[in-house]
Amino acid sequence: MALCVESRPLEIGNNSIYPVLVLSQADTCSTYYLVEAKDLEGQLTGSDVGLLFSACASLYALVFVFKLARRQFGF
């Protein structure tokens, strides 16, 4: 399922035709996509969470070592 914007003609009167943008839900979209169903699903996997956690732990350890070195040099 996707949310799409389509341009459709709207007849007003006898000879007046105006293009109108219409929002539609379809499995496939031949016009402009607004939101696809896969955009609404969670994108984080277990390995992504593990990498994020390890990056945070590494940053915390780096700050700890930096503070310890500053203390040893008397700053």
Image: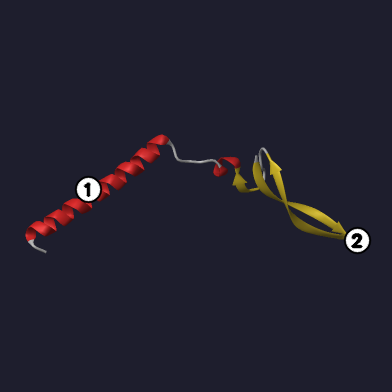
The residue to which callout 1 is attached is 61
**On screen, 10 above or below 41?**
below
Of residue 62 and residue 1, the one placed in the foreground of this image is 62
Q: Does residue 6 appear left or right of residue 34 in this picture?
A: right
Question: Which residue appears at 60% of the width and 41% of the height?
Answer: 37
Residue type (three-letter) at the residue carrying disc 1:
Ala
Residue identified by numbered label 2: 13
Q: Residue at x 70, y 43 (%)?
A: 25
Give whichever of 58, 28 is nearer the camera.
58
SS at mark 1? helix
- Mark 2 surroundings within 10 Å by alpha-carbon count, few (fewer than 14), some (14 through 19), many (20 or more): few
Horizontal placement of 63 versus 75: left or right?
right
Q: Is residue 3 left or right of residue 41?
A: right
Say which element carries label 2. loop
Three-letter amino acid code at the position of disc 2: Gly
- Quadrant placement of the N terminus: top right
Label ID, residue 17: none
Judged left or right of residue 2, residue 11 is right
Q: Nearer the viewer, residue 50 or 29?
A: 50
Q: Residue at x 8, y 62 (%)?
A: 74
